[in-house]
Image (cartoon, helix red, strand yellow):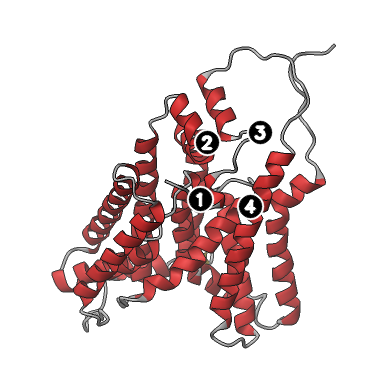
Amino acid sequence: MTTGLPRRRRPTAGHLIGSYGLLALAVVLFVVFALVLPDTFPTMANLRSILSTHSITAMLALGAMIPIVTGKFDLSIGYGLGLWHVLTLQLIIAVGWPWPLACLGVLIGGALTGVINGLLVEFARIDSFIATLGTGSVMYAITGWVTMGARIVPDSEGLPADFIGISEAKFLGLPVPAFYVLVLAAVLWIVLERLPLGRYLYVIGSNPRAADLIGIPTRRYVVYAFTGSGLVTGAAGVLLAAQQQIGNPSVGIDYLLPAFVAALLGSTAIRAGRPNPLGTVVAVAILAIGLSGISQLGADFWVTPLFNGVTLLIAVGLVGYTTRRRLRTGPSAPRRTPPPPSEEASVESAATPAGGPPPPWTVPPAE
């Protein structure tokens, strides 16, 4: 007996490669470096080092991913990371705030910065590249003003042990920052994949016109996205302060490129063709494994930015290819006329169009 419901198509080899190829590549890289460096790479000490070192990059990449879902870009995250980690230490050491209050103040500051970015982009109608680069420069100036260009070093009493513990603690034998990343990724996955808020953000990113037609308040949700990015950046700044225990006014910029590489490369994994938190975590894993391996092989200092730059170009190319492939292989077979769609179904169909222009995260969005 036939019904009017379309059959669920089996995943093709191309679909599986597109969705899980990046994860397979991470496994292959790990195996290769483990065979080449059997005494140092496949060890628990190296695993702990990778998880601790790249947890900041992972959090920042997840924060950068949120505006990318809406087709916008937040270039202020690197400058914000530098400001918030310096400000955390300044409030604890120089001002004398209790560390929980200092952390809360930094989180609020990060969220407010995200609100400002969203207002500049949506209400002042400034391109997201320009707006966030401008606010990032302002934050970098504030960082220099707070530190006067010098590092913030704790006095002889040091930092509170509980504050340091948020970075140095272990859980199940692994650094606790790795679990922060997993919790953040899980929360973002629930929000983006299971809640109306996430579906609205995907609709705005893939088809802003459709979002307006079905009544989604586009401006408000873009501001929400930038606020989430700012909040995550503030949390990463707190974690970086507890990890380094010294305020370096220029350290945040070093995290900007790896974070964007991971956020864009993650668009080609798990949910290929759309930014997603699980794919971003996989992308960070590839960067972490690759950088750790080439570092242990004795590569020169310039290899790291070369690796990040080449990976960024590959990521952007893969995102564009994946998007074009989705448009070419969209559903073409005729189907029976379905019943009138609900609002939720309209949101889902608008978020994953079978044709039309590619999602705006593949190229800089035109205002």
**Residue holding disc 4:** 320
Residue 177 appears in the picture as rendered: yes
Farthest residue to the right: give it: 1
Alpha carbon of mark 1 to alpha carbon of mark 2: how far? 25 Å
Judged by depth in the image, the label closer to the viewer, 1 or 2, is 2
Query: Which quadrant would the N terminus be assigned to in this image?
Result: top right
**Residue holding disc 3:** 354
In the picture provided, is 58 more to the left or to the right than 271? left
**Residue holding disc 2:** 207
In the picture provided, is 34 more to the left or to the right than 158? right
Q: In terms of sequence position, does the residue under pointer 4 or pointer 3 come before the other? A: 4
**Residue holding disc 1:** 185
Q: In terms of sequence position, does the residue under pointer 2 or pointer 3 come before the other? A: 2
For disc 1, the neighbor class at 10 Å (few under 14, some 14 to 19, many from 20) is many
Residue 279 placement (x, y as % from top left): 60, 52
Residue 224 or residue 335, whichever sits in front: 335
SS category of the residue bearing label 1:
helix
Q: In terms of sequence position, does the residue under pointer 4 or pointer 1 come before the other? A: 1
Alpha carbon of mark 1 to alpha carbon of mark 3: how far? 28 Å
Instruction: Write the residue at 20% across / 79% down.
Output: 148
